[in-house]
Image: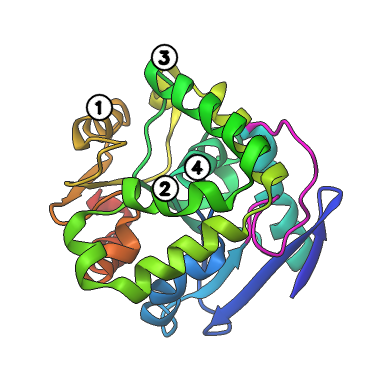
Amino acid sequence: MIVEANGIRFNCVISGRQGAPWLTFSNALATDLTMWDEQARAFARDYRMLRYDTRGHGGSTAVNGPYSLDMLADDVVAIWDAIGVDRSHVVGLSIGAMTAVGLALRHAERLDRVVVANARPDNPPELRGARERRIAAIRREGMSALAEPTVERWCSGAFLASQPDAAKKLVSMVAGTSAAGYAGSVHALLGLDYRDRLGGIRVPALFVAGGRDAGVPPEAMREMHRAVRGSQFVELPRAGHISNVECPAEFNRAVGEFLSARSDGR
């Protein structure tokens, strides 16, 4: 379904049990909402789920950037308002995880619990340089030039060898992302620095790291976990950057246990 919110059109999928608590998924950079297919199946009985394509990704409007993290968080709230969601759990990965952090900081009254997966809260110089080079590359050659190298960087060698169809799906997502949407979202990450604000998160939070995530080492996520009072941390040893795709069973178990836990059991 198409939802008009925050001045643009968002491609969304609503599924799961009617009347159940809402669960919103926010996708990684250069992916679309189908990256959450395994989670949509796993949580269908217990939650009413919203998956949406981030602006500039998938079937959502690809407006020229730059974007900001505040904008991406406000997009989610605008979608909720448009479809009548008062409160929701939020699960985000990569830039989707930083969108989830933005929601926890700016719109805590709309959140129940938040899951932050495979993301870091800052943009160190070496990462900034790499991101700027990728923007330059897509302007010269288009997204297809980045597709296979990106997936090879994201995923462990074991996954690429054993799950070629899943890897091919990720490659297609990256190649199909609009250059404008990718560049706009990368600009949002260039200004990323939530380190001094993480202590302001007051909603129950779970941080999920991939043991084989070369871009976001587990220790970076442990630091976020330590900064958020009462939060939880899980490392998936076999997972790379797109941990929910590489290790869906382990990811779903960790997220499901966290979402269903009693509030006083944080």
Crowding near the residue tagged with mark 3, few <14, some 14–19, many ≥20 C-alpha atoms within 10 Å? few
Residue 262 in the figure: left or right of residue 115: left
C-alpha span from label 1 to label 4 = 18 Å
**Residue 202 sits in quarter:** top left
Foreground tag (2 vs 3): 2
Going from N to C along the chain, the mark reached first, 1 or 2, is 2
C-alpha span from label 3 to label 4 = 18 Å
| In front of the other: 262 or 149 | 149
Start-end of magenta stretch: 53-68
Residue 125, labelled with which disc? 3
Q: Determine contact: label 2, label 3, CB under 8 Å.
A: no
Label 3 residue SS: helix
Q: Determine contact: label 1, label 3, CB under 8 Å.
A: no
Residue 108 in the figure: left or right of residue 148: right
Going from N to C along the chain, the mark reached first, 4 or 2, is 4
Crowding near the residue tagged with mark 4, few <14, some 14–19, many ≥20 C-alpha atoms within 10 Å? many
Q: Amino acid at mark 4?
A: Ile
Residue 179 in the figure: left or right of residue 230: right
Going from N to C along the chain, the mark reached first, 3 or 4, is 4
Magenta segment, prevailing SS (helix, strand or loop): loop
Residue 150, labelled with which disc? 2
Residue drawn at the location 25% of the way across and 48% of the way down:
266
Question: What residue sits right under mark 4 in the picture?
Answer: 95
Q: Amino acid at mark 1?
A: Glu
Foreground tag (1 vs 3): 3
Question: What residue sits right under mark 1 in the picture?
Answer: 223
